[in-house]
Amino acid sequence: MGASQTRPEHRHQDLADRTGFSLEQIKNLHKRFQQLSGDEDTISKENLESIPTLANNPIRKQIIGAFFDKSAFAECLLAAGGAPHFPYRHQRGFILFGLRNQHRGEAGSCDQIGFEQFLMVMSHFRPPTLKMTAEEKEAMRREKLRFLFNMHDTDNDGTITLVEYRKVVEELLSKSGSIGQEAAEAIADAAMLEVASTNVPTMGPDDFYEGITFEHFEQILKGLEMESRMHIRFLDVDTTTMRCGKSTS
Amino acid sequence: MDLCTMDLRITRQRGFLLFIFTCSSLLHGSRGEIPSKPTGGVTILPPIKPDNGPQAFPDAEKENMPVFTMNYSRIQIPFEITLWVLLASFAKIGFHVYKKITVWVPESCLLITIGLIVGGIMHSVHEEPPAVLRSNVFFLYMLPPIVLDSAYFMPTRPFFENIGTVLWFAVVGTLWNSIGIGMSLYAICQIEAFGVQDINLQENLLFATIISAVDPVAVLSVFEDVSVNEQLYIVVFGECLFNDAVTVVLYNMFNFVAEMPVVEPVDVFLGVARFFVVGFGGMGFGILFGFTAAFTTRFTSRVREIEPLFIFMYSYLAYLVAELFSISSIMAIVTCALTMKYYVEENVSQRSCTTIRHVVKMLGSIAETLIFFFLGVVTITTDHEWNWGYILFTLLFAFVWRGLGVLVLTQIINPFRTIPFNFKDQFGLAYGGLRGAISFALVFTLPDSIGRKQLFVTATIAVILFTVFLQGISIRPLIEFINVRRTNRNLDTINVEIHCRIMDHTIAGIEDLCGQWSHFYWKDKFMKFNNQILRKILIRDNRAESSIVALYKKLELQNAMEILDDVSGDISAAPSKGKENAKPKRKFLAPDLKNMHDILSKNMYKIRQRTVAYTTKHALPNESQSKEILIRRHASIRRSLRPGSFQSSVVPKSHKYFSLPAGKSLDSKFPPGMTSYADDEETMSEAAYPSRRSRLVQPARSSSSRAMMPLRRLDTLTEVHSVDVVDEKVGDRRRAARGTSRTNSSSSRDPRIPAPQRHHSSADNGRGSADNFRNGHHEEEEEEPQPLSPAPSWTAEPREDAAQNPLLRRPQWKPKK
């Protein structure tokens, strides 16, 4: 498994510094990454979409999309440690390559990602530690909100338009079977209206609310507790191999 | 017999309460058959003891045919029990008259205080305490309702998310406390100065077990009021539940051991083995009976009136059978309740469900109230053996070991938790360890063979009083002072709802991606199993979505579309909206939001259950509001549809939730509506039912049933509007009842809709009358059976719905366009 890595420890240490994961966690995630990618250095959307347990997830597309979102990636890099230096040439090369080619697909998304980005996205879900200060927690929360926001904002223009919102809600409801497109739209519309009314209270009847900006997004989710919702306990123990016989290899 | 006389005394003592000074001598004299003598004056205080009044007659002579006889001994026991329960209940009413008391002083404190007063009165006349709290009575009649109450209202999702921690604290924590306190006390007993050398290790352990049962009712209600974070809440909640089970198991074990002359090492191992047998055996029985209960309710659709009975009987049966085999009956009843709850609530009708909840709540709270009450009484009336050393050290150790236990156990469990407990949480956990009803009952039912039972009772009471009063009262200010992390549970916007779900799905998806199937993996597996097998077996109405759902959705859609249009600027197109234009700021009204919220919550695919509103031990989860909103909404639809036969534009207007005049709430609009709807509620409450079901995990099915009922209601409503004749037939009474509210609503609506337009009138009228007729019949038929049943007429409906839809179709909804 580790054959493709020349110096796993060094690389992992570096990643650990930047993402806040422990070495064990990174090792586990790396194993998983290789498992998903079939021992390649990069992973494609198809790799992720083929995960069987993900098949039932109604917002599968958005989740996977978040991994291939270049703006999210750039943000990760910035958030992670200021100067976005890339220790792995081949990977950076690949990413740039991916970015260059991205205009074929949806705006702002790549076709392939490397382990680093995979890890970066994952790092959004690190649980808070006991030592974190209130500001750090607040920053973390913002980061998570931003992640959610980017999941909605498929065209990366900084606003969630009604169309985008509708799409998400639709997908969200798609697995319930009982709700059609129209109802989903209705709900999205109502939600949108709600955003509008919270954020632009003085809006005239002829005004058009063109989309949710991140500030508005923060505003509407202000009181919501994210701590218990947007965290995953990344295991130090390697569960992948523990359950290997059952569901993976 | 003992019980009888004791109870008799209770009555007399009650008499004392009433006429402390006037009747005391009378009471003393009265024995046996004539306890009712003092009640002659009872009319002074009718609310407390009304039933005694009529009996205040002289005994009839026996020789001749008695004109009037009294056989008090016959009814004595139930009679006195009733009076006790009544007294306790009155006390509860009393506390809530003045709301502020219960905010600052926990209810258990007040109950104990009342008990103390009553006990004081009894003591002053040298009465014995009631012997209601005997071992059998407690274990067979008082404990089951208390436990069932907690188990049935356990918030399922947070519980299963934190099940590891809960069990860790409940099992290991209780063991830790028992052994720690027991050993330390044993060490204390070796000190000669205290004079308690005769208490051996087993007895110490037994006693320590008793006082390590936490019962944080008071704490839970405080936690709920200040809405502390979910994790802390659920751990305290779950801990008290399972810790009862552990405590009772340990209690029985040590009780057995304490009577053994010699304890051999092998007994220790047997004890450990027994511990597991007892625990898992209880669980097994619970699951067995839970599924049986669920399966039974599958067939109760024709006998709605006895539905709730099954729940109680099966739970109780689980308890009794477990008791029969001497395995953990608490475990059995807890798992039984947890297992069946989900399926049962889906099978039974709304009203049965409400009944179940209320009765569970009621029984539980009565049992607990009585125990606290007796605690007060017993505190005063028994002879205490007060040993400063032992009791003070008990207090100290109870406090210290609890704190230590929480500290140590949290350190161990924290690495395994997603959100670790910080020190504030730990403080809440440790400080929330109040001792309560269970401890008292356990110690009071100790066999007399325990040499220092008196001392144990005294010490336990001391611990309980200390914790309940001191900690119970101070925990609220402390929690507020240290500012424990709180969860904002007022999720009242659609966006929040949507995003909660998105987050749930995201997390599940990410977990899948990184291949860590910790929590969600198993949950997913279970859900699959549940959907494919369990539901098919256990739930009656497990069919696929009907197309009625589509109609419902359409309805919602149209409402929302109109709103959207309003906002995006073509409000001006509608002349009738001038008023709103004057007020450009259109705010969502809370009920409207709730309504959308409701739609969302019932239609979403759920990976996880929504955060359930916390339940206190003494309050039902408040779902009435959303229910009411639905009721109102449908009521308003109905109302609006009826005038609709002559005023069409009323229909769309009132139909929308967002079309209320800005600043007016639904409540203000239809103020008397709710109350005057007694008859409607029969049908409407069914329609409103969904809100409860939204708690259930099942996405597809629940939404179908849910969406279906309102629809059906809508149908009946629509017909009503056009043909009043049918309406006459369907329900004169309803109409009469609605009269007031209708005028009300129409008057309030009038200013907003000055120009009635009728677009779909003729077509709909024709259609409507036909439908009306049909539906009228439906309504008659279906009033009784509940809507969940897959009534054949409904499966046939889709076609008709489509036909009827014109009424609901968008162009007609928006005549102004």
Image (tube, rainbow, N blue to C red):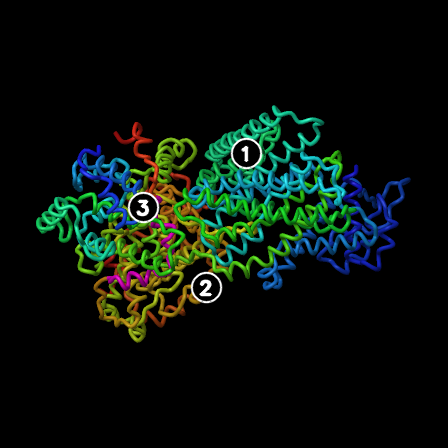
Q: Is residue A54 above or below residue B272?
A: below
Instruction: Using the image as rendered, state which of residue B69 and residue A243 is in the foreground.
Output: A243
Q: Quadrant of residue B278?
A: top right
User: In the figure, is residue B166 to the left or right of B458?
Assistant: left
Using the image, name the chain to which the residue with label 3 belongs. Answer: B
Query: Which residue corresponds to the image point at 32% horizontal and 38% vertical from the top-left?
Result: B516
Q: Mark 3 and mark 2, same subunit?
A: yes
Using the numbered discs, state the Cα–Cα distance from disc 3 to disc 1 in whole angstroms: 33 Å
User: Could one spot residue B42 in this view of the protein?
Assistant: yes
Magenta residue check for A217: yes
Which numbered marker is on residue B670? none
Using the image, name the chain to which the residue with label 1 belongs. Answer: B
Q: Residue furthest top?
A: B266
Stretch in magenta? A212-233
* Circle nearer the N terminus (3, 1): 1
Residue B273: horizontal and vertical position, in percent?
Answer: 56, 27
Instruction: Indicate the quadrant containing the N terminus of chain B: top left, top right, bottom left or bottom right.
Output: top right
- Label 3 crowding class (10 Å Cα cut-off): few <14, some 14-19, many 20+? many
User: In the figure, is residue B268 to the left or right of B598?
Assistant: right
Mark whose residue sits in front, 3 or 2:
3
Instruction: Indicate the quadrant containing the C terminus of chain B: top left, top right, bottom left or bottom right.
Output: bottom left
Q: Which residue is mark 2?
A: B741
Using the numbered discs, state the Cα–Cα distance from disc 1 to disc 2 in whole angstroms: 50 Å
